[in-house]
Amino acid sequence: MVKRHMSQEHGTEGPDYDPYSYTQYKMYVDDKVFTLHIGLDVWAAAQESGLLMYKMSFLNHPMDPRGPRNTETDIIAQWEKDVGLTIEQFSKAYERVHGRPKGGCPTCGGPLESGSGYVGEEVIYCPKSTCGVVWSEVPSLSMIA
């Protein structure tokens, strides 16, 4: 029997004065881990039993001495081929399993609201200034400072 597990993480990277958002997708299949990171850099990696099988990265400069650049499309296509799902299918499956926060704020019990975070991200938060509750652990949500 094949054991599968998914994880999806949102966050920021780069300097504090100019942060960039990122999304990282991981698919665990038995002892293999397939990771796709889309943010300031786009990269994909695969590990088996803790050993790196490959890592593809988008090189920002065409004259990079490490060799020719991979396009973002090539990197995403390789990860999708390895995982057997598109990013959209992965995100839908993850949300179906892990869900979105329902109900009210765990601090005050009031209703939650939705708003924009970094570009392309959605944030669910408690509108009361005394709570300051923001969800960042659920797919397609991010914590903003």
Image (cartoon, grey):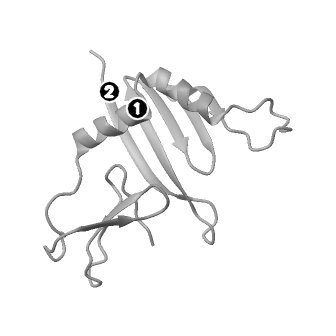
Q: Residue at x 24, y 52 (%)?
A: 100
In the rendered structure, which disc, 1 or 2, sits on the residue that comes first in sequence?
2
Q: Residue at x 49, y 59 (%)?
A: 119
Q: Which residue is mark 1?
A: 27
Q: Relative to residue 112, is residue 120 depicted above or below?
A: above
Disc 1 secondary structure class: strand
Q: Residue at x 48, y 62 (%)?
A: 118
Residue 57 rendering spot, x and y as whole percentages: 66, 36
- Left or right? Give the position of 124 relative to 48: left
Per the rendering, the mark at residue 4 is 2
Residue 120 rendering spot, x and y as whole percentages: 46, 55
Whether residue 49 appears in this view of the structure is no
Disc 2 secondary structure class: strand
Q: Amino acid at mark 1?
A: Met
Q: Amino acid at mark 2?
A: Arg
Report, in whole angstroms, how far the alpha carbon at label 1 lies from the one at label 2: 7 Å
The answer to the question of whether label 1 and label 2 lie on touching residues, with beta carbons closer than 8 A, is yes
Per the rendering, the mark at residue 124 is none
